[in-house]
Image (cartoon, rainbow, N blue to C red):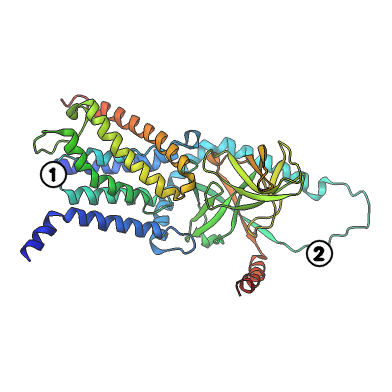
């Protein structure tokens, strides 16, 4: 017994070390965004309140570029509203209230903390479930996609950026209409990669890539980026494409959270398919 | 003794805020991510009890983790560094008597101190980036990130050391 006691006393720091590392591994295992745990929720609340008070100061530095982006977006939207068009053929399309059903609505939010220099980057927004932000909602900036909400607390939301190794987004080439998957290889935050775009239809440098609308979080046609360079992978028959993001993720300030009114219905539909697949 | 604890506490708080509010927002080419808060562990006095080194490093790691949306990774790397630190100090400091002095370039000699810092920071950064990415097919990118962040962190620590501990011969 005495020997055991002496042994413990002599090597207590090894046991302490192992205990603390075990605790760390436990914390790391909580990071999975499939389920929100109490520990990470508390952590988000703490960092959120500090970041939001810090943001009151730092947001002034981005005012000019944020304004610029918003003006550009206004310009684009102004070109789209009905009053900018003249009806050429009368009486073919009539627009009544019952024809159009609203599918997407947007919640405005501010980015209060962001990183671009890690392999897996996150944003924190100043709106949480008390403002209607929910898990799995898409987030877009005035000029492009940003990411997907992975977690909400009462006043804050944590967003998985497209600059994350688990981020996969279905995108489309506006010219050729072919679709592919947007990923990020972790190298430079202004460049993203598109895979799974068939090389049977030729793409060009400078083609615009937008969201396809196949993923239920984003509406169709949200800008993503322009093709910078591409190579044909002869083995798979798909392109390896590098694109320049339209959004500068390092200067992100104002974003919109996308609310899809039909998401539940779509999810139910997909769920039916998934369960029959598994049988 | 009490004075040393107070100094360490102040260093803890200052380095923590410097890391979270300033350094984490640096994004040179989207790659450089200096983590100067490790300096706290490097700077602990020679004969700090081991349990205190381990727990304080773990706490600092957890505090930084809370602000980086990925829990546990900094804590793991910091605890590992705190565990290895006494071995390295023995190797590099030779015959320094039992005191509450803090390791610095003027006490250890510049070359010794440089190696001591580089090894500790390298262990921390490598662990941090490996755990943060957790994908073997990106090992080259992880090593590259580790190297340039290591360079940035070591340069900042050496400069800070020269500024704050220059005249304590």
Q: Quadrant of residue B157?
A: top left
Return the residue found at the far front. Answer: A235
Pick whichever, A35 or A44, lies toward us: A35
User: Which image quarter holds the C terminus of chain B?
Assistant: top left
Residue A133 locus on image (x, y percent): 56, 60
User: Along the horizontal axis of the image, is B131 left or right of B13?
Assistant: right
Pick whichever, B15 or B120, lies toward us: B120
Pick whichever, A108 or A31, lies toward us: A31
Q: Residue at x 65, y 68 (%)?
A: A270
Residue A179 locus on image (x, y percent): 70, 51
User: Which image quarter holds the N terminus of chain B?
Assistant: top left
- Circle 2 crowding by C-alpha within 10 Å: few under 14, some 14–19, many from 20: few
Q: Quadrant of residue A208?
A: top right
Q: Residue at x 63, y 60 (%)?
A: A259
Residue placed under numbered mark 2 in the picture: A99
User: Along the horizontal axis of the image, is B73 left or right of A183?
Assistant: left
Q: Is residue A245 visible?
A: no
Residue B94 locus on image (x, y percent): 14, 33
User: Along the horizontal axis of the image, is A120 left or right of A78?
Assistant: left
Q: CA distance from mark 2 to mark 1?
A: 76 Å
**In what element is the residue under mark 1?**
helix
Residue B52 locus on image (x, y percent): 19, 50
Number of residue marks: 2
Q: Are discs 2 and 1 less than 8 Å apart at CB?
A: no
Residue placed under numbered mark 1 in the picture: B2
- Circle 1 crowding by C-alpha within 10 Å: few under 14, some 14–19, many from 20: few
Return the residue found at the far right. Answer: A90
């Amino acid at each position: 017994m005495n020997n055991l006691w002496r042994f413990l006393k002599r090597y207590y720091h090894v046991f302490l070390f192992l205990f603390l590392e075990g605790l760390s591994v436990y914390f790391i295992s909580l990071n999975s965004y499939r389920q929100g745990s109490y520990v990470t929720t508390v952590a988000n609340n703490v960092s959120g309140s500090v970041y939001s008070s810090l943001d009151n100061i730092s947001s002034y530095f981005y005012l000019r570029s944020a304004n610029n982006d918003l003006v550009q977006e206004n310009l684009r939207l102004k070109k789209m509203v009905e009053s900018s068009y003249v009806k050429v053929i009368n009486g073919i399309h009539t627009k009544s209230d019952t024809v159009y059903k609203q599918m997407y609505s947007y919640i405005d939010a501010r980015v209060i903390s962001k990183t671009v220099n890690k392999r897996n980057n996150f944003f924190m927004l100043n709106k949480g479930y008390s403002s209607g932000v929910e898990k799995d909602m898409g987030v877009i900036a005035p000029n492009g996609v940003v990411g997907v909400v992975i977690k909400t607390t009462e006043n804050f939301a944590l967003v998985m950026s497209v600059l994350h190794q688990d981020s996969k987004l279905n995108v489309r080439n506006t010219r050729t209409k072919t679709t592919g998957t947007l990923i990020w290889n972790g190298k430079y935050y202004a460049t993203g990669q598109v895979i799974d775009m068939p090389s049977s239809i030729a793409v060009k440098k400078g083609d615009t890539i937008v969201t396809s609308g196949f993923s239920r979080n984003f509406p169709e046609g949200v800008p993503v980026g322009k093709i910078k360079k591409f190579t044909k992978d002869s083995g798979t028959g798909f392109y390896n494409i590098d694109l320049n993001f339209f959004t500068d993720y390092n200067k992100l300030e104002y974003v919109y959270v996308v609310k899809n009114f039909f998401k539940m219905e779509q999810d139910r539909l997909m769920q039916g398919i998934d369960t029959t697949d598994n049988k | 003794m009490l004075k040393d604890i107070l100094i360490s506490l102040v260093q803890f708080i200052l380095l923590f805020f410097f890391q979270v509010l300033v350094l984490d927002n640096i994004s040179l080419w989207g790659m450089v991510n200096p983590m100067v808060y490790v300096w706290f562990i490097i700077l602990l006095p020679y004969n700090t009890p081991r349990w205190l080194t381990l727990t304080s490093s773990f706490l600092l790691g957890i505090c930084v983790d809370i602000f980086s949306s990925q829990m546990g990774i900094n804590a793991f790397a910091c605890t590992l560094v705190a565990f290895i630190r006494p071995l390295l100090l023995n190797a590099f400091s030779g015959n320094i008597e039992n005191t509450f002095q803090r390791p610095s370039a003027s006490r250890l000699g510049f070359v010794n101190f440089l190696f001591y810092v580089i090894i500790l920071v390298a262990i921390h950064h490598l662990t941090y980036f490996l755990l943060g990415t957790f994908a073997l097919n990106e090992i080259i990118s992880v090593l590259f990130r580790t190297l340039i962040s290591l360079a940035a962190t070591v340069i900042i620590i050496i400069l800070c050391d020269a500024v704050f501990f220059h005249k304590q011969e």
